C-alpha cells in the first residue's frame, strides 16, 4: 500500500436493507452509486453489513471503482457479490452491527429501519462521528426530531450527529476529519 | 422448582445506569423497589445488565424478596451485590445488551440514556414485548415522540411498545401475557 | 446470601455430551451424581454447558441437593431440565465454551471428545486451575500423554492440570484452594 | 476480480506468535516466506490472527506478492503492518480464533503453543480440513502423538488432520481440494 492508502479512512455505510429494485432502496440508487465511487476514488475503505439494499449498491460502485470493500456479515452467509472480503461472524444482525463499529472511523447513514437506528446508537456509544445523509428517509431523518441540542443522542454528548445533504458535502466533511488526524 | 416457577417469565429491566444516590436515578428509587419486589413475589426471574443505577435498585429489592436475580455483565466485572448470578461476557456494553435480549421474555424500560435506547431497538429486533414505564424520563419517554402509529419502531411492526404508568399496570399487563402462553 | 455462599466457588464441569442412558456417559452416572451433590452441599455454584451427557447428570444431582446450577448454552436452546438459569448465548458450541470460562473459578474434566479438549485449552488460556478426573476416558485421560513436565499445556506454564482419581480427592483439592483465597 | 480469484480458497494459517527475530519463530522464516508467496501467487486469500510470529511472516510475504491478506484480530488492536484489512473483534484470543474459523476453507498449522492447539480443535469442530506442517515443532507435531487412527481428534471423525512436510506438498494437497469443489 502506498502512503495515501495508509492515511485513508474506514467509512461505515449503514441504511436500508432489502431488494435494490424496490422501494425504499431503488430511489436511492444514484446517491449510493456516487457515494461508493467517491469512497473508492479517494482511497478510503468501505465497510458495511455486506448484504443487500444500500449496502449492495454502495459496495457495487466502490468495487467497480477499484476500492477495498469489506462486509461484516451476520450468520454464516456469503454477502453480496461486490465484497473484497466478507467477514462471517455467526452473529445475529444486531451483534454483528456492534462488531462493525470496531472497524470504522466514521459512519454515514442513509434511510434505514430499526436496525439502522440501532447502528446509530452503537456508533454513538463508541464515539464514532456520524453523518446523516438527509432527505433519504427512515431513521436517518427521523432521529433528528429527538436529538438533544439538535446533535446528541444523550446528555453524555459522546459525539455529534451531523446532517449532510449530499455526497459531495459528506466527502468535504471527511476531508476536514483527515486534516485533523 | 414448583410448577408456578416453571411458568414464570424472565423479565428484563433496562434504564439509567449511574450512582443510586444521584440524579437521575435517586428519584426513581421507590418505583424500582416496588418493581423488584413484585417481580420476585410473583415468581418471575429478574434479568438486567447487572450494574448500578436502575439495575442495582431493582436487583436489590428482588433479591430481598427472595427472587432469582441474573445480571448480564459487560467485560469481566463483578456486577452489583444483589445478583444470584452475574454472567461475565467479556463484551462491551452494547454487545452484552444484545446477549441479554436472548434471555428475556419481556422488557420494561425506565428512563435511560443512549445505551437504553439501543436496548429498545435490540428488543424490538428480537420481537420481545416492550413496556415503557412512562414519566421516568430519558429515552423511555423520548422514544414515544417518534413511534410509527404510536407504537412501532419501524414499518415491520415486529412488536409493540406499550406505555404503562405504574408498576401495578405493568404487572397486570404481564399477567395477561402469561394467560396467552 | 450468607457469608459461606459469598466465599463459594464457581465450579465448571466439562466432559462428554450425549444421551445419559448410553455409552460413554452411562457408566459415569454414579460419579457425576456424587460430584453434583458435593458441589451443592458445600455451597458452590455449578457452571456447565447446560446440555446433556455429563452436564445433565451433574446438574440434576446438584439441583436436587439445593444448589445453584447455571448452564452456558449454545444457540438459543433451553438446556436440560435442571438449571436454575440457562444463559442463551446464540453462539456455536466452541464460542460458548470460551464464554463459560469467564464464569468459573476452577474446572473439572470428565471424559470428553474434541469439544472438551477445546475447553481444556480455553481454561488454560485463562489460567483457570484444571482438574482431570482420571479414569473417565476421552480427552481427560488422553491429554496426560502430551503434557509438558507432566502438567502444562505449553511452555508458558499458565496453570497446572492436576490429576484427581475421585470426587472426594477433587473436593479436598478445592478446599485447599479456598484456604488460599 | 477475475474468475480464478472467485474460485480461490481462504487459507487459514495458525502457529507460533511472538517476535519474528527470536526462537521459536526465527528458524521458520524461510518456510513462512515461501508459504505466503505461494498462497498469494495462486490467487488464494490469506486469513490469520493478524498478529506477530508466524502470522506476521506469512502476511508479509503474501502482501508483497500481491495477495489479499486478512487478519482476525483480538481486542481492538491494529495487527501487523501487512494486512489488507485487519478485523477488530474486541474478543479475547480464543474467541477470535473461533471467529476466524468461520472465515477459512482450510487450515495449515506451523508449530504453536496452547492457542494453536485450541485453533486445531476449533477447526476440527467446524469440519475444516487441517494440514499439519510437520517438523515445525510445538502442537503441530505434538498433536500427532494422540490422534485417533493417526488422523482424528475424536470418535466423530469430523475431518482428517493430514501431515505435510513442505509448503510444496501443502500446495499440491490444496489443488486436489480445488478440483473437488
Image (cartoon, coloured by chain):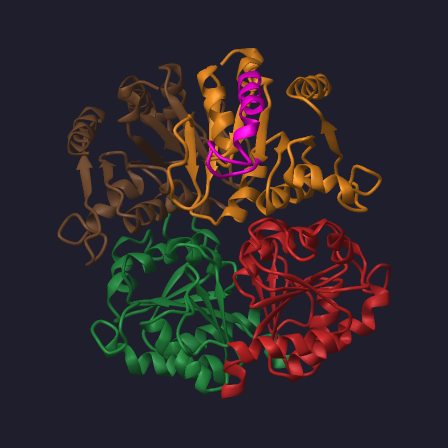
Chain colours: A red, B orange, C brown, D green
Using the rendered view, name the quadrant where residue C9 is placed: top left
Using the rendered view, name the quadrant where residue B140 is placed: top right
Could you tell whether A140 is left or right of C71 in the image? right
Q: Is residue B17 covered in magenta?
A: yes
x, y percent for residue D151: 36, 57
x, y percent for residue B134: 69, 30
x, y percent for residue C110: 30, 35
Q: In this figure, what is the number of numbered marks?
A: 0
Work out whether residue A88 can be spotted.
no
Observer-nearest of C135 and C66 = C66
Residue at x-position 76% and y-position 62%: A53
Could you tell whether D15 is left or right of B150 in the image? left
Observer-nearest of C47 and C117 = C47
x, y percent for residue C33: 33, 21
Observer-nearest of B112 and B6 = B112
| Above or below for C77 versus D147 | above
Quadrant into which the N terminus of chain C falls:
top left
Quadrant into which the C terminus of chain C falls:
top left
Residue at x-position 81% and y-position 64%: A20
Observer-nearest of A177 and C34 = A177
| Above or below for B64 versus A165 | above
Residue at x-position 44% and y-position 43%: B89
| Above or below for A14 versus B62 | below
Could you tell whether B99 is left or right of A131 in the image? left
Work out whether residue B84 can be spotted.
yes
- In the rendered image, the residue lying farthest to the left is C149
Span shown in magenta: B15-38
Q: Is residue A157 covered in magenta?
A: no
Amino acid at each position: 500500500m502506498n502512503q495515501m492508502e495508509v492515511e485513508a479512512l474506514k467509512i461505515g455505510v449503514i441504511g436500508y436493507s432489502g431488494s435494490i429494485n424496490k422501494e425504499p432502496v431503488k430511489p436511492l440508487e444514484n446517491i449510493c452509486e456516487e457515494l461508493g465511487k467517491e469512497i473508492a476514488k479517494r482511497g478510503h475503505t468501505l465497510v458495511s453489513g455486506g448484504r443487500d439494499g444500500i449496502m449492495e449498491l454502495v459496495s457495487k460502485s466502490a468495487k467497480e471503482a477499484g476500492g477495498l470493500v469489506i462486509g461484516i456479515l451476520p450468520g454464516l452467509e456469503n454477502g453480496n457479490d461486490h465484497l473484497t472480503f466478507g467477514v462471517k461472524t455467526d452473529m445475529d444482525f444486531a451483534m454483528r452491527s456492534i462488531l462493525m463499529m470496531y472497524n470504522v472511523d466514521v459512519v454515514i447513514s442513509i434511510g434505514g429501519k430499526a436496525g439502522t437506528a440501532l447502528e446509530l446508537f452503537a456508533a454513538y456509544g463508541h464515539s464514532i462521528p456520524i453523518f446523516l445523509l438527509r432527505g433519504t428517509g427512515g431513521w436517518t431523518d427521523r432521529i433528528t426530531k429527538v436529538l438533544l441540542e439538535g446533535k446528541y443522542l444523550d446528555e453524555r454528548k459522546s459525539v455529534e450527529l451531523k446532517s449532510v445533504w449530499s455526497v459531495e458535502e459528506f466527502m468535504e466533511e471527511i476531508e476536514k476529519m483527515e486534516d485533523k488526524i
